[in-house]
């Protein structure tokens, strides 16, 4: 199963020494690109975990529900996730701030911004094919640097950055809407108590509304409701199996 569009990820190595940005449509592609950019040996058995809490991304079904711009960690065999300590971070791609005594080393962002500017100089319409991660790189880049790279005046560059920010927001809202529909489809499979499978999610919609300002919160609430009903279904199944075993 593949995401319709690639999702941008920030990928740490197992020791949080190096972080790179990659775009992937599947768990396999995320591992492959992470291995390549972090220079990990081909023979290493890799696993992907969410950087914030160590949740293992075990399959593509779970991968589909990971939001764009999620920070993950690529662990080699024998490595285990641990909470971030203040002295963990030594190198980054410049997208996150880190509490560190040493300087932040920009590994790839500057070169990627220059490559994007080169594409735009050749054809300004190329911006429509940029990923959300690439659009964010441009919107966050230094205005003076973009002015020089794109050979445009400052006003035009600022308008370009505003357009990039708006396009990122539009894509996120579209993705959130798709995730919400996927979650609605997931809930019936977690039912089993005879209740209308869409009752809980739709009650959330009714109470929260459907404007773009709360779409992220809405998706998170429906995701939480889906997990709750899945756990409830599992408990009910376990209870039924235990009762059946006693009857034998």
Image (cartoon, rainbow, N blue to C red):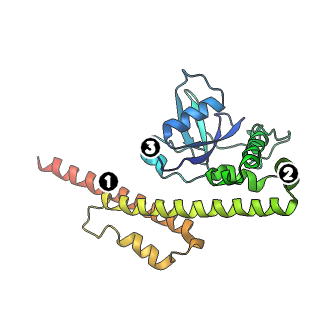
Q: Position of residue 135 (x, y in %)?
A: 69, 53
Instruction: Measure the C-alpha gap from mark 3 to mark 1.
Output: 21 Å
Q: Which one is in front, 74 or 42?
A: 42
Q: Position of residue 97 (x, y in %)?
A: 77, 49
Q: Position of residue 241 (x, y in %)?
A: 21, 50
Placement of the N terminus among the 4 image quadrants: top left
Give above or below for 186 relative to 63: below
Front of the two marks 3 and 1? 3
Q: Earlier in the sequence, mark 2 or mark 1?
A: 2
Taking the image as shown, residue 23 lies to the left or right of residue 25, namely right
Judged from the image, the secondary structure of the residue bearing numbered disc 2 is loop
Indicate the quadrant where residue 43 lies: top right
Seen at 45% across and 65% down, the residue is 222
Seen at 79% across and 47% down, the residue is 99
Q: Which residue is mark 1?
A: 234
Taking the image as shown, residue 197 lies to the left or right of residue 64, namely left
Q: Which one is in front, 162 or 80?
A: 162
Find out whether the residues at labels 3 and 1 contact each other: C-beta distance under 8 Å: no
Seen at 58% across and 60% down, the residue is 171
Q: Earlier in the sequence, mark 2 or mark 3?
A: 3
Query: Quick one: label 3, few (<14), some, or many (20+) residues within 10 Å?
Result: some
Q: Which residue is mark 2?
A: 151
Outermost residue on the left side: it is: 248
Q: Position of residue 87 (x, y in %)?
A: 77, 39
Q: Earlier in the sequence, mark 3 or mark 1?
A: 3
Judged from the image, the secondary structure of the residue bearing numbered disc 1 is helix
Q: Which residue is mark 3?
A: 60
């Amino acid at each position: 199963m593949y995401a319709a569009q690639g999702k941008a990820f920030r990928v740490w190595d197992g020791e949080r020494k190096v972080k790179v940005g990659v775009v992937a449509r599947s768990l396999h592609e995320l591992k492959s690109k992470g291995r390549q950019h972090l220079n990990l040996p081909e023979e290493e058995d890799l696993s992907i975990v969410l950087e914030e809490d160590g949740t293992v991304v075990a399959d593509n079904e779970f991968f589909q529900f990971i939001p764009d711009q999620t920070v993950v960690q690529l662990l080699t065999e024998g490595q285990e996730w641990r909470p971030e300590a203040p002295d963990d971070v030594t190198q980054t791609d410049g997208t996150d701030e880190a509490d560190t005594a040493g300087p932040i080393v920009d590994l790839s962002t500057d070169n990627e911004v220059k490559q994007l500017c080169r594409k735009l100089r050749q054809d300004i319409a190329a911006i429509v094919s940029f990923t959300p991660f690439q659009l964010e790189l441009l919107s966050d880049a230094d205005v003076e640097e973009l002015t020089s790279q794109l050979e445009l005046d400052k006003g035009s560059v600022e308008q370009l950055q505003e357009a990039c920010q708006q396009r990122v927001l539009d894509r996120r809202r579209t993705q959130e809407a798709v995730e919400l529909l996927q979650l609605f489809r997931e809930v019936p499979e977690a039912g089993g108590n005879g209740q209308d499978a869409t009752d809980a999610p739709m009650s959330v919609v009714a109470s929260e509304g459907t404007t773009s300002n709360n779409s992220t919160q809405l998706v998170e609430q429906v995701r939480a409701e889906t997990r709750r009903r899945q756990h409830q279904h599992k408990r009910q199944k376990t209870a039924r199996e235990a009762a059946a075993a006693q009857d034998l």
